Image (spheres, rainbow, N blue to C red):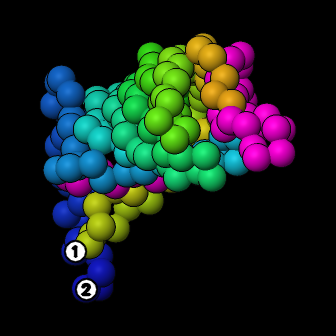
Amino acid sequence: MANAKPAATLLILLTLLACLAGVVSVTGESAAGSFGFVIDGYLVTGTLSQGVIGHGGEVHMLMSIEQTVSSQYGPIQVVGSGTWAGETDYHSFSGAITGVAGTIQACVVFYCETGDFTGSGTWSGSMTWSSGGGVQGSGIFQGTLTLTGQQVTTSSSTGQQSTAISSSGPVAISGNWTDSFLA
């Protein structure tokens, strides 16, 4: 019976919020979520922030990437952003990833090459609720990044060339995501 009180309070609060016109915001205070994928053998991670669940179950999150990946050739800096939008039935999520744009800069010794990328994809997942942790979402995503620019190549002492980062054409990506939404 003691556990029924928080559940009943949550149910009443949700009912009141659903009756209100407009948007019901469930927003994290800071970058509360993350996502990650592997490209050319390097792990790229980013953040999901400003998660909103609107009236009717519309979901909106902003993604950002600002990471420097260490490689055997030198640092690779990845900077980008995009939007994750979709819907929830308050048990599961699904949606599209749009407006993805950014840059990749690879530096080898004293030479740096920059390429741009754009992308899109889809995402899905499940939602859990807890009295101590608020709303938590997690799942998978997949998409395509289209990279433009030149390849960064290096020469070894034996004269063989190798590519530090391949930066042209479409690249399929997939990974996992998680985000916390605070009420």
3D distance between C-alphas at marks 2 and 1: 6 Å
Above or below — where is 41 with respect to 18? below
Look at 21% across and 35% down and name the residue there. 24
User: In screen coordinates, is 167 left or right of 52?
Assistant: right
Amino acid type assigned to the residue bearing label 2 in the image: Ala
Task: Say the numbered circle drawn on residue 5.
Answer: 1
Is the residue 124 above or below the residue 134 in the image? Answer: above
Q: Closest to the observer: 149 or 173?
A: 149
In this orientation, which residue lies closer to the viewer: 89 or 107?
107
In this rendering, the answer to whether 182 lies above or below 173 is below
Magenta segment range?
A: 154-183
Q: Are marks 2 and 1 in contact (CB under 8 Å)?
A: yes
Q: Which residue is mark 2?
A: 2
In the picture, measured across the screen, residue 35 lies left or right of residue 16, that is right
Q: Secondary structure at mark 1?
A: helix
**Residue 103 % position (x, y):** 45, 24
Q: Across the whole image, how many numbered discs are drawn on residues?
A: 2
- Principal SS element in the magenta part? strand
Image-quadrant location for residue 170:
top right
